Image (tube, rainbow, N blue to C red):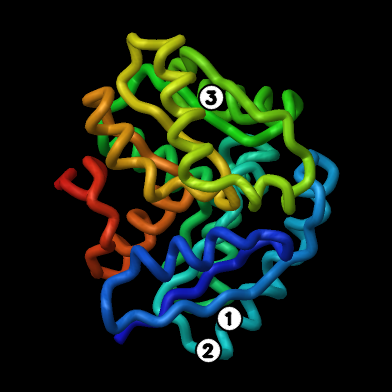
């Protein structure tokens, strides 16, 4: 039985149920939280200060792996911050660690993606940071569209129907892409991914799907995601 740990913003209500649904039988999920209400650059920066304490608490449960499950929180300071975050959390927990932003990069690279479209719930400030991060990791961001939300509670009220409609709208405006990325671990979207893949015949990933896939690879277990990403060797 594997014990999976996640570090999440305190207002996130989506990561835990999506992780639980995707983890194979015999795995247990254990969460520690960092304070965050509004998804702004300032709020995410302040939240990051609580990551190490949260990981320390998870170490008490002897988790087999840990995920920093926040997309913009792990890319806010650009490339390098994400890997440093993983290293710190791994050292604290004594287990493999992944950070969502870097998990997304690994997933897109595994899928041989060059041109990507992005659907987010964020306001323009975070969309700009996300575009900058993906560009710095050598992806061409053909389109990025955000809902303009700042309250993480409002983001958590979005569901997979919203995600599918959003993804279809983004892809309709940006047809020449290699993949769609639905960003934010609080954006409930995993149930929409396979449908979008079937409709547009391209890989579709989300923040939680990429993070789950990445961490499960480290632990040596197979997630129940049923998307193109999980067929990559």
Q: Do the residues labelled 3 and 2 touch (CB within 8 Å)?
A: no
Q: Where is residue 47 in the image (x, y as percent from the top left)?
A: 77, 57
Mark 2 surroundings within 10 Å by alpha-carbon count, few (fewer than 14), some (14 through 19), many (20 or more): few
Q: First in sequence, mark 3 or 2: give its number.
A: 2
- Residue found at x 47% / y 41%: 161
Q: Name the residue under label 2.
A: 61
Q: In which quarter of the image is the N terminus?
A: bottom left
Q: Is mark 3 on a helix, strand or loop?
A: helix
> Mark 1 near mark 2, Cβ–Cβ under 8 Å?
yes
Query: Residue drawn at (68%, 23%), measured in percent from left and top?
Result: 128
CA distance for labels 1 and 3: 32 Å
Badge 3 is on which residue? 136
Q: Which mark is residue 58?
A: 1
Q: Earlier in the sequence, mark 1 or mark 3?
A: 1
Real-space Cα separation, disc 1 to disc 2, in angstroms: 5 Å
Q: Which of marks 1 and 3 is in front?
A: 1
Examine the image and state in which quarter residue 126 appears.
top right
Q: In this view, does 107 lie above or below 212?
A: above
Q: Judge the density around disc 3: few (<14), some (14-19), many (≥20) Cα neighbours within 10 Å.
A: few
Local secondary structure at mark 1: helix
Answer whether residue 82 is visible to the viewer in this image.
no
Residue at 45% across / 61% down in the picture?
Answer: 18
Q: Position of residue 185 (x, y in %)?
A: 55, 51
Q: Is residue 10 above or below residue 27?
A: above
Query: Within 10 angstroms of label 1, few (less than 14), some, or many (20 or more) residues?
Result: many
Identify the image quadrant of residue 105: top left
Q: Position of residue 197 (x, y in %)?
A: 27, 33
């Amino acid at each position: 039985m594997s014990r999976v740990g996640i570090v999440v913003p305190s207002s996130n209500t989506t990561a835990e149920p999506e992780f639980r649904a995707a983890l194979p039988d015999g795995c247990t999920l254990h969460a520690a939280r960092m304070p965050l209400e509004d998804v702004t650059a300032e709020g995410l920066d302040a939240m990051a200060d609580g990551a190490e304490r949260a990981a320390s608490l998870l170490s008490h449960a002897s988790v087999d792996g840990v995920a920093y499950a926040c997309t913009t929180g792990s890319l806010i300071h650009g490339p390098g911050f994400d890997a440093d975050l993983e290293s710190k959390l791994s050292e604290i927990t004594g287990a493999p660690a992944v950070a969502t932003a870097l998990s997304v990069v690994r997933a897109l690279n595994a899928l041989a993606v060059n041109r990507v479209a992005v659907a987010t719930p964020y306001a323009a400030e975070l969309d700009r940071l996300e575009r900058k991060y993906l560009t710095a990791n050598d992806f061409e961001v053909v389109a990025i569209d955000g809902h303009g939300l700042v309250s993480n509670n409002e983001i958590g009220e979005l569901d997979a129907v919203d995600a599918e409609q959003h993804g279809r709208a983004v892809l309709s405006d940006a047809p020449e892409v290699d993949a769609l990325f639905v960003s934010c671990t609080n954006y409930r979207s995993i149930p929409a991914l396979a449908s979008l893949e079937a409709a547009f015949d391209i890989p579709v990933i989300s923040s939680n799907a990429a993070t789950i896939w990445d961490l499960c690879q480290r632990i040596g277990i197979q997630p129940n995601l049923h998307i193109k990403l999980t067929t990559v060797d």
